[in-house]
Amino acid sequence: MRYTGPKFKLCRREQVDLFGSKKYDVKKNRNLP
């Protein structure tokens, strides 16, 4: 799994795409470990 950085962790915790970017699409990536 590629390193997505601290922003992505925030996105996952909040369960929203905080950054309006496809890179941080939470719905697609919700199943990450």
Image (spheres, grey):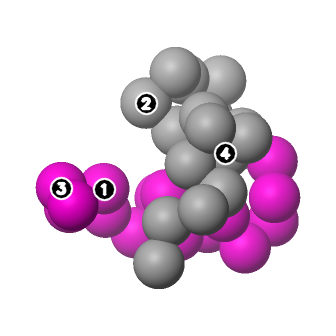
Marks 2 and 4 close (CB-CB < 8 Å): no
Q: Secondary structure at mark 2?
A: helix
Q: Secondary structure at mark 1?
A: loop
Q: Quadrant of residue 14?
A: bottom right
- Which numbered dot is residue 4? 1
Marks 2 and 1 close (CB-CB < 8 Å): yes
* Quarter the N terminus occupies: bottom left
Left or right, 8 with reference to 15 = left
* Residue 15 drawn in magenta: yes
User: CA separation, marks 4 and 3?
Assistant: 15 Å
Q: Position of residue 30 (x, y in %)?
A: 65, 57
Q: Quadrant of residue 18?
A: top right
- Residue under the image location 49 percent in, 58 percent down: 8
Which residue type carries mark 3? Arg
Left or right, 20 with reference to 33 = right
Which residue type carries mark 2? Lys
The mark that comes first in sequence, 2 or 1, is 1
Which residue type carries mark 1? Thr
Which residue is the site of mark 4? 26
Which residue is the site of mark 3? 2
- Residue under the image location 40 percent in, 69 percent down: 6
- Which numbered dot is residue 23? 2
User: CA separation, marks 2 and 3?
Assistant: 11 Å
Q: Secondary structure at mark 3?
A: loop
Marks 1 and 3 close (CB-CB < 8 Å): yes
User: CA separation, marks 2 and 4?
Assistant: 9 Å
In this picture, which residue range is highlighted in magenta?
1-16
* Residue 17 drawn in magenta: no
